[in-house]
Each structure stands twice: as structure tokens, then as C-alpha cells.
Image (spheres, rainbow, N blue to C red):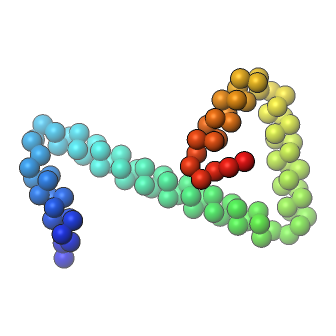
Amino acid sequence: MLTKQRLELLDVIAQTPEEYIPALLDFVHFFHQQRITKSSSASAWDVAMSEINSSNPERQSIRRQRISQLFSTLAVLDSADEQKETLKIIESVEGLSI
């Protein structure tokens, strides 16, 4: 059974001039890809956070040490400008804070 919104969408597509169909199709593919990427990224993040929060204290300590080592290594390897650019990228991710 088609919903009212689906029927409306099909009507709009039917009224779209033929030369614009490829662009519309590209948009629909892009829309689906963004939804899949956002969904899988959020799911992977949730799994990672769950693993970190529910693991035993010894594993949590090892992870903290490794993260600390990673940031120390990045501080040595990256210039101040690269670090600022990386921070801007991290801060631009919706729902992420450090």
C-alpha cells in the first residue's frame, strides 16, 4: 500500500522534465548513501563506547594509556597549525565533544 507521501513523491517525479531525471537520481543516491553512512557511523560509535565503558578496569586502563600515547605522538609529529585544523574538524562533527 502506498502512503500519501509516496504518492506525492511519485507525482513530483512524474512531473519532472526528462533532462532533470539523471540529476534527481544522483540526488536520491546521495541521500541514501548519506543516511547509510551516518547510521553506520553512529552505530559503530555506540558499539565502541559500549565496549570502552563495559570492559574490565584493566582493559580500560590499557586503552587510556594507548590513547594518551597516541595524543603524545600526534603532538610531536603535527605542527601547531595541523593540530588546530584537526581540532576544527573534530569539533565540526555533530554530537562529538572532546
Determine the residue located farthest toward the bottom in the rendered image: 1
Left or right relative to 27: residue 3: left
Residue positioned 79% across, 33% down in the render = 74
Q: Position of residue 81 (x, y in %)?
A: 71, 23
Q: Is residue 5 above or below residue 78?
A: below
Kindly identify the residue that appears in the image at 19 percent across and 76 percent down: 1
- Labels in figure, total: 0
Percent of width and height locating residue 76: 84, 28
Residue 60: image location, x then y, percent = 85, 61
**Residue 48, x across and y down, in percent:** 69, 60
Q: Is residue 5 left or right of residue 36?
A: left
In front of the other: 85 or 67: 85
Q: Which residue is at 82% across, 31% downward?
A: 75
Query: At x 85% / y 48%, what residue is drawn?
Result: 66
- Above or below — where is 74 with respect to 10? above
Answer above or below: position of 48 versus 16.
below
Of the pair 94 and 17, the residue shown nearer to us:
94
Write down the quadrant of residue 82 in the picture: top right
